[in-house]
Structure formats: structure tokens, C-alpha cells
Image: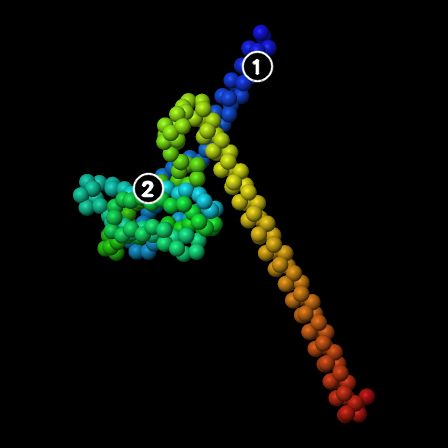
Amino acid sequence: MGKDINLRSGTALTLLMLLSFTTFLLPKAEAIWLTIPNSGTKCLSEEIQTHVVVLADYYVITDDAAEAHQPHTISVKVTSPYGNNLHHNENVTHGQFAFTTTESGNYVACFWLESKHQESATVSLEWKTGISAKDWETVAKREKIEGVELELRKLEGAVEAIHDNLLYLKNREAEMREVSEATNGRVAWFSIMSIGVCISVSGLQLWYLKHFFRKKKLI
């Protein structure tokens, strides 16, 4: 009986530790404030792998009552690593975009003011990717789970996201290593060719000087 109580206590303690650790594993989505100059573009980027859901909300922050009546208007453009246009909005004060990545690399979001006569503006951007973009309330309602079970599902999703990210980094490392090895091989062959050319030129110079001195009867 005492062993069963100790076992249950240990299991409960393990679950509590896992649930508390979930807050560290789950990526937190926090809003970013961007100061948009009256001329030029402000961009931010994030390196994302394929098959990742991206959600974002943005809006212009108004500082006083005057700006509340006539807020700044901005234009937004989001592009993929290969330059494909994923979102483009002009002359707006707020908006959102969502997409699933099909390319690995840097996804860029750029903001600029619609009119050059406006002063600089501040934009709040909440950018969510992967597990942060998942609607856990819908998952809980659909699968009829709550409480500890829901937190365990979140923990499972966070672990899968970390695992996928590690595999992505491993593949990127392998690709970079192959590129580095190929570059080193080319540099080695180029060095050998350079040494061969130098030796050949030196030999030709010696032969020419020897032939020249013999012709002039200096040797």
C-alpha cells in the first residue's frame, strides 16, 4: 500500500515538473514594436523551415487623440526566400496574414509609410510560427480534452517542434559541410594549378635567359 502511494506521488510530481517545464519549451509569441521612418522601409526576417504555419497581426500604434482621428497608414509586403509575394497590403492601419511555408530560408516582412509627408510611425507586430500559431482552444474542443491532458498535448507539440528544428539544423549543417568540403577541394586544386603555373613560368624564364646568354656568348 505504501509503495502504491509513493508511486502515485512520484508520478504526480513528475507530471507537475513536466507541466511547469512546458512554459520553457513552448515558444512565447510577443508583440514587436517597429519604428517606421517617414522615408525608407523597415524590414524584419526569420529563418523558417518548410511546412510551418505562420500567423501575424499588425496595427499602427496611436500616441495621442490627433493620431487616433487621423492615424498613420502603412504598406506591408511579405516575401518568401525565393521572392514570392505572400502578402501585400497598402494604405492600411492594421491587418493580418497567414500562410504555410513551402520554402526553407528567410521570410521577410517589410513596412513603410504610405505618404512621405507623414512623421515616423510605430507598428506593433505579433508574429507566431509553428507551435505558437496552433489554436489550442479549437484542439481542446475538437478532441474534448482539458486540464492536464491539454497541457501534455502542448508539451508533446513543443517536443515535436524542437525535434523537427534539430533535424532541420542537422540537415543544414550537412549541406554547409558539403559546400565547405567542395570549396576546400576547389581551393586545393587551384593552389596546385597556381604552383604548377609558377614552376612552369620559372622554368621558361631560366630557359630563355640561358638561351639568351649563350646567343650573346656570355656563357
- In the image, taking residue 52 as reference, residue 57 lies left or right, namely left
Could you classify mark 1 by the number of other residues whose Cα lies within 10 Å: few (under 14), some (14-19), or many (20 or more)?
few
Q: Are marks 1 and 2 in contact (CB under 8 Å)?
A: no
Q: Nearer the viewer, residue 27 or 87?
A: 87
Q: Residue at x 57, y 14 (%)?
A: 7
Report helix, strand or loop for mark 2. strand
Give the spatial CA distance, label 1 vs label 2. 46 Å
Q: Quadrant of residue 166?
A: top right
Residue lying farthest top? 1
Q: Residue at x 33, y 47 (%)?
A: 35
Residue occupied by mark 2? 57
Where residue 7 is drawn, which disc sits there? 1
Of the 4 image quadrants, the one containing the C terminus is: bottom right
1 or 2: mark nearer the eye? 1
Q: Is residue 77 above or below residue 7?
A: below
Of the 4 image quadrants, the one containing the N terminus is: top right
